[in-house]
């Protein structure tokens, strides 16, 4: 009556108990972005215009630098005479 009960298959309990991982949270699908041809054309035209303005500024800077060198040379020649 007071004797311990012995199991029929004496196996030790597992040392490491696997627990189920939480399922990955559901990701909402990204909203669809529609790009129309008008938007693409506007971006291309804007890029061309900005590039043209940058080129115009660069050409102007070079021409001003050349004019300054020429004027400096002319003024230096006048002071020598």
Image (cartoon, helix red, strand yellow):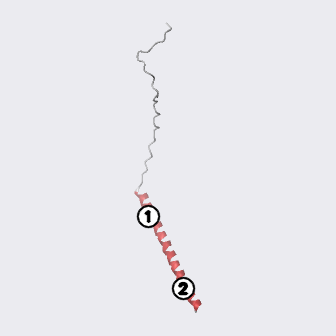
Of 57 and 16, nearer the camera is 16
Q: Which x, y percent locates residue 79?
A: 59, 89
Label ID, residue 73: 2
Element class at badge 1? helix
Q: Nearer the viewer, residue 73 or 50?
A: 73
Of all residues, the one furthest to the top in this rendering is 1
Q: Position of residue 31 (x, y in %)?
A: 45, 46
Nearest the viewer among 10 and 46 is 10
Q: Residues within 10 Å of mark 1 (few under 14, many from 20)?
A: few
Q: Are marks 2 and 1 in contact (CB under 8 Å)?
A: no
Closer to the N terminus: mark 2 or mark 1? Answer: 1
> How many tags in the picture?
2
Relative to 40, does residue 80 appear above or below in the rendering? below
Residue in the picture at 48% in, 66% down: 50
Find the distance from the CA under tag 2 to the CA under tag 1. Answer: 42 Å
Which x, y percent locates residue 45? 44, 64
Image side of residue 79 versus residue 28, left or right: right
Residue wearing tag 1:
45
Residue at screen point 41% across, 15% down: 8
Extreme residue in the right direction: 79
Q: Residue at x 50, y 72 (%)?
A: 57
Secondary structure type for disc 2: helix
Q: Position of residue 9 (x, y in %)?
A: 41, 17
Label 2 crowd (10 A; few <14 / some 14-19 / many >=20): few
> At 56% across and 84% down in the image, what residue appears?
72
């Amino acid at each position: 009556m007071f004797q311990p009960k012995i199991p029929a298959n004496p196996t030790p309990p597992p040392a490491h108990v696997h627990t189920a991982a939480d399922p990955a949270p559901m990701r909402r699908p990204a909203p669809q972005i529609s790009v129309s041809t008008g938007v693409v054309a506007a971006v291309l035209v804007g890029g061309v215009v900005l590039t043209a303005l940058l080129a115009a500024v660069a050409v102007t800077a070079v021409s001003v630098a050349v004019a300054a060198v020429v004027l400096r040379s002319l003024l230096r020649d006048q002071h020598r005479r």
